[in-house]
Amino acid sequence: MKTNSSTEIIRITPEIAVEWLVEKWGEQRTLKNPHINRLAADMEAGRFRLTPDAILRIKGKVANGQHRLSAVVQSGKAQWFLVMESDDEDLYKVIDAGLRRTVQDSLIGMPYAKSIPSIARWVQAYENKTLKSGSRNGSEATAVGKLFPTQCETIDYCRSNQEILTNAASFVNPIYEKTRLLPLSIGGAIYVLSDSRGCLEKAKLFLELVYLEGGNTAAGDLRNRLIANCGGKSKLHNGYVFGITIKAFKSFCSGTRPGVLKWAKDEPFPTI
């Protein structure tokens, strides 16, 4: 059966987005407000860009792109989109069949592109004071109400801080591979944070002791806690590990011992 389709770039205003969202084609996914918030934040900041991912309308009804259109409404900012109009009902079956691009995909060609985003997210969580003990990774650690940073923000951060992030991954990776006691992303974050605070050499020594040697220092105390965690039935969340790592590093810098390394529920946010 012959079908008719056309594609063009259209500037979609909040008014057009509202009109299009009234009628949708087929069963659509439940709207995820955090995703809308991320997109709207990028639009408000001027980071949102025209992409090859077209908004598809089948017989005049929106078949995909409801999150992007909702973000246009929320931000109040008109955006350019590739829009495909078609009367082919079978197109709906192949929507979102591709593989979503990640931050890592956007950093192809950068040394340690696989490691850098996870380091960056822990640093952002620390600097934004959104670190949580129950976080399994840096993305969860940065989630407070709205899910920030957005993917565009993380990409921009990685590119703007490429040198220090690359240096961190380059230093930590070889010693991490020998024991894997402390997640590379957390070790790298300690490296980056200490560099901006003028204590990078102490951080290098601290990380070497944590991963490789231990000893009668705060680094050794952390190493022992991490070894115990490896053998325990209930594993510590990485957010908790990051918190006690910060506490251990602070003690290491001051030449003291932290005693029992823990991050109490009601305890203030750990700082270097």
Image (cartoon, rainbow, N blue to C red):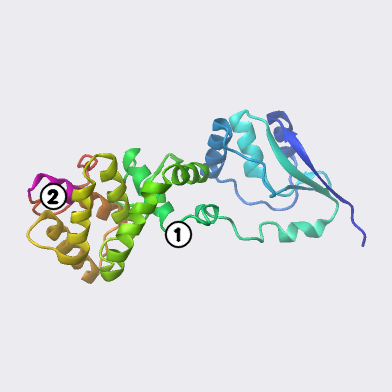
Helix, strand or loop status at disc 1: loop
Can residue 140 be seen in this snapshot? no
Determine the image quadrant of residue 233: bottom left
Above or below, 232 against 109 in this view is below
The quadrant of the picture occupied by the C terminus is top left
The quadrant of the picture occupied by the N terminus is bottom right
Q: Position of residue 165 (x, y in %)?
A: 38, 50
Magenta stretch mostly in which secondary structure? helix
Q: Amino acid at mark 2?
A: Phe
Q: Position of residue 23 (x, y in %)?
A: 75, 41
Residue closest to the eye, 272 or 146? 272
The residue stretch that appears in magenta: 247-256
Answer with left or right where residue 3 lies relative to residue 49.
right
User: Would you say residue 35 sits in the magenta stretch?
Assistant: no
**Residue drawn at x 14%, y 63% as measured from the top left:** 214
Determine the image quadrant of residue 10: top right
What residue does disc 2 label? 252
Inter-mark Cα distance, 1 to 2: 29 Å
Helix, strand or loop status at disc 2: helix
What residue does disc 1 label? 114
Q: Position of residue 44 (x, y in %)?
A: 56, 31
Q: Amino acid at mark 1?
A: Lys
**Residue drawn at x 36%, y 47% as measured from the top left:** 164
**Residue drawn at x 46%, y 57% as measured from the top left:** 113
Above or below, 118 against 193 in this view is below
Answer with left or right where residue 180 lies relative to residue 70.
left
Q: Position of residue 70 (x, y in %)?
A: 63, 38
Can residue 212 be seen in this snapshot? yes
